[in-house]
Image (spheres, helix red, strand yellow):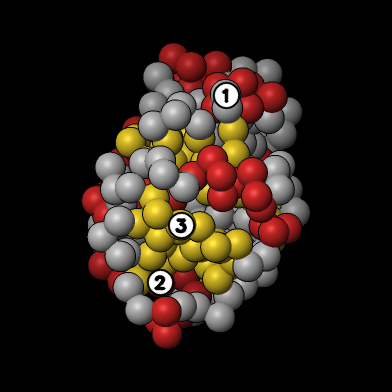
Amino acid sequence: MPELPEVNTVKKGFEETVLQLMITGVEVHDSKIIRNVGSEEFVSALVGRRFVDTYRQGKYFFGVLDTGLNVLFHLGMTGDLMYYYLREERSKYERFNIHFSNDLILGYDDLRKFSHILLLPDRNRYLKEIKLGPDALKISQQDFYQIFIGKKTTLKSVLLDQQLLSGIGNLYADEICYQARLHPASIAGTLKKQHIKRLFQLVRSILIEACEKEAYYQIYPENWFWKWRDSAQNFVEGKGTLGKMKIGGRTTYFVEGYQKLIN
């Protein structure tokens, strides 16, 4: 599933490509992908308007129309925005498209149809209703510290809880725990202030670097855990044993003997 850096890259591409362009048409091929309004209302709200701004909180990305309405592009597992000019370039999994005045077409592509596309008059009210936590790149160090106090769940479960901290998924949670040298099964509420400070610093540095590299995995640092873990031998030289377990229902990788278990 796309995580904060992947969604941030989609947002950046959207800003660079379609902001301020007049919308001249909308075609909906699969009305079920638009979750809260019918196709006709969705089309009517967009045609003749412009996207004038964007907003992202965690994995939730919004295009803001000049009327103040927001279109939520929640990508789910396989959602993506595709830009093209020729109809023959359209993806077979396109669910709807938006035509612009310069003949550019934005196609919304989703193989598995887990996306949530919503037309929202009040973005802030919606985010409050779903109890989405603060963005992982915007949270203050003090607020970050507060989310660990008294927590009896695991460190990884806290990092993945979108109501506590939005934007971190499975891949980056494992990376953060590895670089912090903390076992992901550590009990969150037992971590010391120095542990949490280190986690805060790593959340920022890892996500910022991934965003700067536009979530292009091939150019991520070679020493990042996830880049070598699948090819590593059972024993990780000089560190410990490569481990794998389920935490909070998610497959989790770590290095036993290198990442300290705190409980």
Q: Determine the residue positioned at 41% across, 44% down.
A: 48
Nearest-to-viewer mark from 2 and 1: 1
Q: Is residue 17 visible?
A: yes
Q: Secondary structure at mark 1?
A: loop
Q: Position of residue 33 (x, y in %)?
A: 67, 57
Decide: is 127 above or below 183.
above
Residue visible at 50% across and 57% down? 26
Q: Which mark is residue 64?
A: none
In screen coordinates, is 25 left or right of 13? right
Residue topped by disc 2: 228
Query: Where does residue 57 sit, x and y in percent of width and height?
Result: 47, 34
In the image, which is nearer the foreground, mark 3 or mark 2?
Answer: 3
Comparing 247 with 29, the one in front is 29
Q: Residue at x 46, y 47 (%)?
A: 47
Mark 3 sits on what residue? 25
Q: Amino acid at mark 2?
A: Trp
Q: Which mark is residue 122?
A: 1
Q: Quadrant of residue 64?
A: top left
Q: Earlier in the sequence, mark 1 or mark 3?
A: 3
**What's the residue type where badge 3 is placed?**
Gly
Q: Nearer the viewer's eye, disc 1 or disc 3?
A: 3
How dense is the environment of label 1, judged by Cα within 10 Å: few (below 14), some, or many (20 and up)? few
Type of amino acid at the residue the image marks with label 1: Asp
